[in-house]
Structure formats: C-alpha cells, structure tokens
Amino acid sequence: MLRNFARRMSIASPEAVQQYRAAGEDRMLKHLAKVAESAYAKGNLTSSRELYSSLVMARRQRHGDNNMLTISAIGKLSVVERKDGEHEAAIGLAREAVDGSEKLLGALHPDSLRWQTNLAKALVAGGELAEAQAAARDAVEGYHMIYGAGHADAISAENILAAAENSVGRALNAAAQLARLYALCAAAQQA
C-alpha cells in the first residue's frame, strides 16, 4: 500500500501533491480545534489555552487573518483567557475577533454578534463597564434586528448588559458612599 502511494505521488503533478498536503494540514487543524474544545469542555484551561494558541498561529499561517476559521480560533482563545482570569488578553483577542468578523461578514451577522457578546463579557470581567455596556447594547440591538427580542442569544446579551449596568450602579453607589465618608471624616477633623 505504501509503495502504491509513493508511486502515485511520484507521478502526480506538483499542484496535486500540494493539494494533498494542504488537505492533510486542514484535517490536522480541524483535529487540533476538536482537541482544544474537548480540553476546554473538561475545564482544563491550561491545555485549552496552549492548544488554541497553537491553532491561532497555525490558522494565521495557513489562512491569514482575514479568514473566519482564524477569527473563530481567536474568539475561542479569548473565551479561554477570560475564564482563566486573563482579562487584558481576553479583551484584546475579543476585539480582534469582533473587528475581523464584522469586516468579513458585517456587523449584523450572527457570528459577529456572538463575538460582540463575548467582548462584552470580557469587558465586564475586566472591569471596563462603560465599554461593556456599549458592546452589550450593540449586541442586543443586533440580535433584536435579526431574531427578535425573545431569541436566546438576544436574552443572553440582555443579561450581560444588565450585569454591566448593575456593576456600574454599584460602582456609582460605592463612590457616593466614599464621598459621604470623606465628608464625615473632614467634618470630624474640623470639630
């Protein structure tokens, strides 16, 4: 069998050999994506991060940055980074996924909205609440336009928006309480 393969490859055109190798590489990258997803599903964030990082590098090399396979791998790596508490990395990767997806598919495509929702989650986790509100609001409006208000993705984005708004409200309340405490301390020092 191996001898037949070698004979076929020796008489194949260089283009056919290149196509065969490319197909093998594509299968390997699909397998790598499945293994990374499996590691993530099992809660192994360290392995998942390593696998998705390798996948992003390989997809960039194979397909370039303007390819949905690359963008999807970047977005999934962002999720892993967020879950592991690496908020700055997660936010940067999520922004890259949103920008790439919107450029290729448009802002109202479900994939673009999914990465927009992921960006909002990363921003909430990273404490960038005003930006998180804007990102979540954009996702909510997009989902409402394409699916309607009752769709599961729209509800998920609405929950993220509510969480961001709730966090902003808590921060404002905490700031007001701090201001009152400072005023009380200043008054006590003067007395």
Image: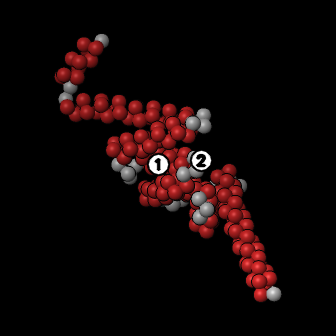
**Is 12 on the left-hand or right-hand side of 130?**
left
Quadrant assignment for the C terminus: bottom right
At a point 60% along the width and 34% down the height, the residue shown is 42
Judge the density around disc 1: few (<14), some (14-19), many (≥20) Cα neighbours within 10 Å: many
**Is 150 on the left-hand or right-hand side of 139?**
right
At a point 54% along the width and 51% down the height, the residue shown is 86
Q: Closer to the observer: label 1 or label 2?
A: 2
Residue 58: percent from left, percent from top: 37, 41
Inspect this view and state whether residue 145 appears.
no
Q: Nearer the viewer, residue 126 or 64?
A: 126
Task: Name the residue tied to disc 1.
Answer: 74
Residue 119: percent from left, percent from top: 56, 57
Q: In terms of sequence position, does the residue under pointer 1 or pointer 2 come before the other?
A: 1
User: What amino acid is found at the position of numbered circle 1 in the picture?
Assistant: Ile
Inspect this view and state whether residue 65 appears.
yes
Quadrant assignment for the N terminus: top left
The relative height of residue 46 versus residue 111 in the rendered view (above or below) is above
The relative height of residue 73 versus residue 185 in the rendered view (above or below) is above
